[in-house]
Image (cartoon, rainbow, N blue to C red):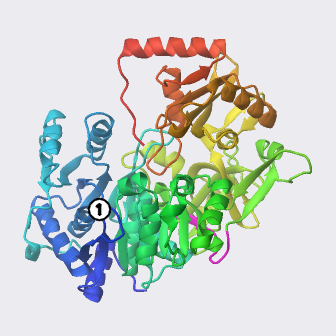
Amino acid sequence: MAEFGSFAELVLTRSDERGDGDAFLFLADGVKGKEPERLSYLGLDRTARDIASWLQERGLAGRQVLLLFPSGLDFVKAFVGCLYAGAVAVPAPLPSEQGQHFRRVSGIVRDARVGAVLTLAEHAPEVEAWLKAEGFSDVACLATDQGAVGDADAWRDPGLSPKDLAFLQYTSGSTSEPKGVMVTHGNLLANEAAIARSTGNTSESMVGGWLPFYHDMGLMGHVLQPLWLGTTGVLIPPVSFLRRPVRWLELVSEYGVNASAGPNFSFDLCVRRITDAQLEGLDLSSWRTACNGAEPVRAETVKAFTERFGPYGFRPEAMFPCYGMAETTLLVTGIPRNRAALLREVDAAGLERGVVEGPYLGALRRTLVSSGVARAEDFEVRIVDPETLVECAEGKVGEIWVRGASVSSGYWERPEVNAEIFGARIVDQEDLGTWLRTGDMGVLGDGELFVTGRLKEMVLINGRNIYPYDVESAVRALNPAIGTGAVFAVDTGGQEHLVVIHEIRAAAAGADLKTVTAEVQQHVGREFAVPVGNVLFVRPGTVRKTTSGKTQRTLMRKLFLEGAVGALHSVLDPAVAALVEAGAQAAQADGPAPAEVG
C-alpha cells in the first residue's frame, strides 16, 4: 500500500486507478428490484474539485465547513470536496424540525466557528432562515446539488500533510456535552488501515450499510473505508433500516456485502422485528465481518443473531465484536479473524469488586463479550486504576487507556480537558509518553479486551459497584413486554437510591404493569442484593440514546430529577419522589432547559 500525505491525495489516486468504476451505490428506499443511484470515482473527483474550488475562492481553506445533508451521495461529494479544498469538514445531523436538532447544530456552528454550510437546495431556505435567526450573518450557505457551483479546473491542490485537520467529529454526548474531536489526515489514514487489517477488508471487498454518515462508525466504516480500499460502497439511509430492518440483510444478500457494521441495538432489532417470511430467499454467506461496536456488546444479542440467521448463511465467525470511539477516529480493537465471538462467564460479586474471576458453582454470573485485541502496529491498550493512575494487573477492572497513530490530538479548543484526557500518564511509566483516557471501564484477559461499562455511570450502593448495563439486561430479560432501559442512582442527602427506567414495547401495551413492577423489584433485589424502590415504565422512545445506540444514562438521570420523564406506571421511594418534585419545581421556575441530542 502506497504512503499518502493526506486522505485527499488518496482519493485523487483512487480516481486515477478506478476511473469510471463505481465508488458508491445508494438505494434511497428499499433494495429488492430497485436501481441504485451510482457515483463513479471520476464523478466523485470532478464534483469534489468543483465544490473545493468554490470553498477556496472564498478563502475557506483551513476553515470549518458544516455539512447538513440527509444520508445520500451528496454528502460524500461535499465531504471529499472539503478535503480537496483543505477545509475542515464538520458533519452534523440535518435539522429536520425546530427544536433539539437545531439547538445542537447552532452550538456546533458557534463552537467550531463555521465559515460556511453546505446542504441541498430543498433544505437551503430553511437553513438560511435558521442562520439568519441565530445571527450567523457571516456564514455562507451553498446548495451543492444545483449543477456546477465553482470551477473544477480552477481547483488548486492545497498541499496537505498528515498533521492537517481533516474534520471535526462532534461526539454524540452519551455522558457529556458534545465536543469536536480533531481528526487529522494522518489519523484518518492510520485508522482506515487499522480497520482493513483487523477486518481483512481488501480492494475486492464490498462494504456497505445503513449507518448515519455524520456518525463516526458510518463515516469511517461505510463511506471512507471503501475509498481507502479502492472498492465500492453500497448504502441505504438509516430510516430505511429503522422502518424495515430486513432491508439491511437484503442489502447484504443482494449485493454480496462482505463488511457491514452496526451498534448492538441494530442486531437486536433484526432478531426481534424480522419475520420468517421476510427471510425467505436471503443469502448472508457473503457477510464476513459484521462489526458490532456498541459498548458493551450484549452476549444475548450475539447468541440470538447468530442462531436466528445461521440457517440463511450467517456464520458465527462473521460476528465481529469490536471497540472504538470518535477520539480514536474509530476502531481500537477487534476479535481475531475467522473466530467466533468469545463469551466469558465471570463471578458477579467479583466483577462488582473490580476483579474478573470464577465463575463459581451456585454463584451469580455475568457474561462478558470480548472486544478482541489491538494490533501492535495500530494501538497499545492498558487498564489503569482511574484514581491512582497505576496500571492494573491482568484480570483487574480499571479504565481503558489507549495510544496510537489513530488517536486524535484532542477536542477543538478544549486545552484543559485535552491535557487531562489526551495527555494522561501512567504512574511510574511517565517517561513512556501520554495516553488517551477513554472513560470506559474494562479488563484484559489473555490479551483480549472486555469492556464492562462507563466510568462515570458506575453506581455505588451500600459500598458495592453496580454496572447499570447488567441491571438493564436482567430487567429486559425478565419479561417480553420490557424494552430498552436506563439505570442510574440518585442521592437523597447521603443515601444512594437505584432508579430503573424501562420502556414498554408497543405490542405489550395491555400488560399488567403493577405486576411487572413487582417482578422487577423482586428479581433485581435478588440478583444484585440492592433495594429497588424506584421503577418507572415509559413509552417507546422515551429512553434517550446516542446516534450509535448508547444509552444516555447521565441525561436520563437529569431528566428524571427535573420531573421530565413521563411514566405509564411508576413506583418511587418517598425520599426520591420528594427530590423529583423539588427538581421539577426548580426546572419550571428556570424555564425549559435546552434539549440534548444523541
Q: Magenta residues, as a range?
A: 331-340
- Secondary structure predominantly adopted by residues drawn in magenta: loop
Q: Is residue 240 left or right of residue 585?
A: left
Residue receiving disc 1:
28
Q: Is residue 254 visible?
A: yes
* Residue 578 position in % (x across, y down): 58, 11
Depth check: 247 or 406 in front?
247
* Residue 86 position in % (x across, y down): 24, 65
* Residue 286 position in % (x across, y down): 51, 78
The quadrant the N terminus occupies is bottom left
Query: Secondary structure beneath disc 1?
Result: loop
Q: Is residue 187 visible?
A: no
Q: Is residue 116 left or right of residue 236?
A: left
Q: Residue at x 65, y 15 (%)?
A: 493
- Up/down of 438 relative to 323, above or below: above
Q: Amino acid at mark 1?
A: Ala
Q: Residue at x 12, y 40 (%)?
A: 137
Q: Residue furthest right?
A: 361
Magenta segment includes 338: yes
- How dense is the environment of label 1, judged by Cα within 10 Å: few (below 14), some, or many (20 and up)? some
Q: Is residue 228 left or right of residue 313?
A: left
